Amino acid sequence: MEYKVICVTNRHLVNGNLCTHLAKIFKSLNKPDILILREKDMQIDEYTDLAKKVSKLCKDNDVICILHSFKDVAKDTKADGIHFSFSAFSTMPESEKKKFNIIGVSVHSKKEAKEAQKLGASYIIAGHIFETECKKGVCPRGLSFLKEICNEVDIPVYAIGGINEMNAALCIEAGAAGVCMMSGFTNI
């Protein structure tokens, strides 16, 4: 069963330097197909410096590089694409969307998924599917939610939230084109 794996970064989960850690991930047997640089709590200058390094690392290792939220940085670094929250994407002018080859959108409902597709998203990330430390105390939406989203749209859907090597196949069976992992890449 073939599917894509997206590594979503969170430098707070990594011991040491994020770029050094990513270099290790890219050399491992479980190299991701896509990387989303999600460090959205950074200031723009700090994120820009990191994005330049990560973009080069991705290019050198044949990994698609998607930046998160910082659209000017994505354009300046010639990242492969950009990822937004649903609210940020839904208010983005059409002229801005045309500047990117790949635009991803995070969704949390069937309505958001349908609207994201209608507004021109290249792919969506639906979640959270399973229990996860990132959403402690928040009930996961589950596989039925994922299947419902996958049946509603014609663009690739990636599952996020508590995904690991043991449950990834369940997400693919539900119709997902792939899975996103954050903490799953921290112990490499």
Image: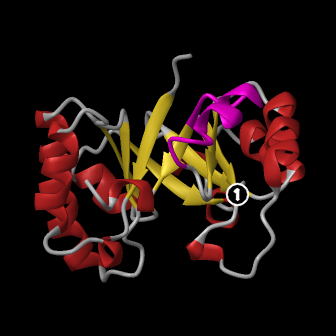
Q: Residue at x 57, y 50 (%)?
A: 163
Q: Which residues are magenta?
A: 164-178
Q: Position of residue 4 (x, y in %)?
A: 48, 29
Residue at image position (22%, 47%) is 25
Crowd rating for badge 1 (residues with CA inside 10 Å; few <14, some 14–19, many 20+): some
Q: Is residue 51 left or right of residue 141?
A: left
Q: Residue at x 61, y 50 (%)?
A: 105
Q: Quadrant of the N terminus?
A: top right
Find residue 179 and report its image quarter.
top right
Q: Quadrant of residue 101?
A: top left
SS at mark 1? loop
Relative depth, front residue between 94 and 110: 110
Q: Is residue 52 at all visible to an observer of this figure?
A: no
Residue 155 location (% of width, % of height): 68, 28
Number of marks in the rendered image: 1
Which amino acid, by three-letter code, is at mark 1?
Answer: Phe
Q: Is residue 80 magenta?
A: no
Whole-percent x, y for residue 112 in the image: 81, 52
Is residue 188 visible to us here? yes
Q: Which residue is mark 1?
A: 130
Q: How does the figure colour the protein chain or chains? A: secondary structure
Instruction: Provide residue 139's location: percent of width, then percent of height.
Output: 81, 71
| Residue 169 is covered by the magenta coloring | yes
Q: Residue at x 45, y 36 (%)?
A: 5
38, 43: nearer the viewer: 38
Q: Is residue 156 above or below residue 146?
A: above
Does residue 50 appear left or right of residue 86 in this picture?
Answer: left
Q: Residue furthest front?
A: 166
- The residue closer to the viewer here, 82 or 135, is 135
The part of the image, by quadrant, that contains residue 51 is bottom left
Q: Nearer the viewer, residue 76 or 142?
A: 142
**Farthest top residue in view:** 1
